[in-house]
Image (cartoon, helix red, strand yellow):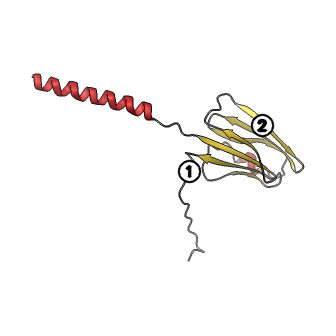
Amino acid sequence: MKSNKFWLITLGCIVIISAVAAFMLRQVPMSYARIYKDGALTETVNLSVATDPYTIDIHGSSGFNILEVEHGRIRVSKADCPDGICIRQGWVSGGLVPIVCFPNRLVITFEGNEADVDAVVGLSKWSY
């Protein structure tokens, strides 16, 4: 009976120490949105630390875009472009696909732990 109690206490200590170590070593993913207007970087937004929602107005000679930023995501909420594809793309939280508004010459790319990739492979009917 004493032997079982010893192993239960030992196992319990290992589980507690592992849980504490996992909690302390947990890495918070950082995600950045880089906003380019007319090919020039205008702003970098850290999506990981955005606590309160806010808007960013982007104006230029080719038009305007209004961006909304929330914790971990961003979107184009208003634009004066004729097609509105950038608005219909909705909330984006990172990854490989940027938000692009061609008529207003706006590009939002994503960088950080969530968007880190080694390679992208695409196959189509035209691949040899």
**Figure check: 72 above or below 87:** above
Q: Position of residue 36 (x, y in %)?
A: 76, 49
Which of these two is toward me, 83 or 29? 29
Q: Mark 1 and mark 2: span between their CA atoms?
A: 25 Å
| Circle 2 residues within 10 Å: few <14, some 14–19, many ≥20 | few
Q: Helix, strand or loop at disc 2? A: strand
Q: In the image, is 99 to the left or to the right of 14?
A: right
**Figure check: 36 above or below 52:** below
Residue that appears at 65% across and 38% down: 46
Amino acid of disc 2? Ile
Q: Position of residue 124 (x, y in %)?
A: 58, 70
Q: Position of residue 28 (x, y in %)?
A: 52, 36
Q: Which residue is mark 1?
A: 116
Numbered label attached to residue 56: 2
User: Looking at the figure, which quarter contains the C terminus?
Assistant: bottom right
Q: In the current view of this chain or complex, which residue is farthest to the left?
A: 1
Q: In the current view of this chain or complex, which residue is farthest to the bottom?
A: 128
User: Looking at the figure, which quarter contains the N terminus?
Assistant: top left
Residue that appears at 21% across and 24% down: 9
Q: In the image, is 54 to the left or to the right of 60?
A: left
Numbered label attached to residue 3: none
Residue that appears at 57% across and 74% down: 127
Q: Position of residue 24 (x, y in %)?
A: 43, 31
Amino acid of disc 1? Asp
Q: Nearer the viewer, mark 1 or mark 2?
A: 1
Q: Helix, strand or loop at disc 1? A: loop
Which circle's residue, 1 or 2, is located before the other in the chain?
2
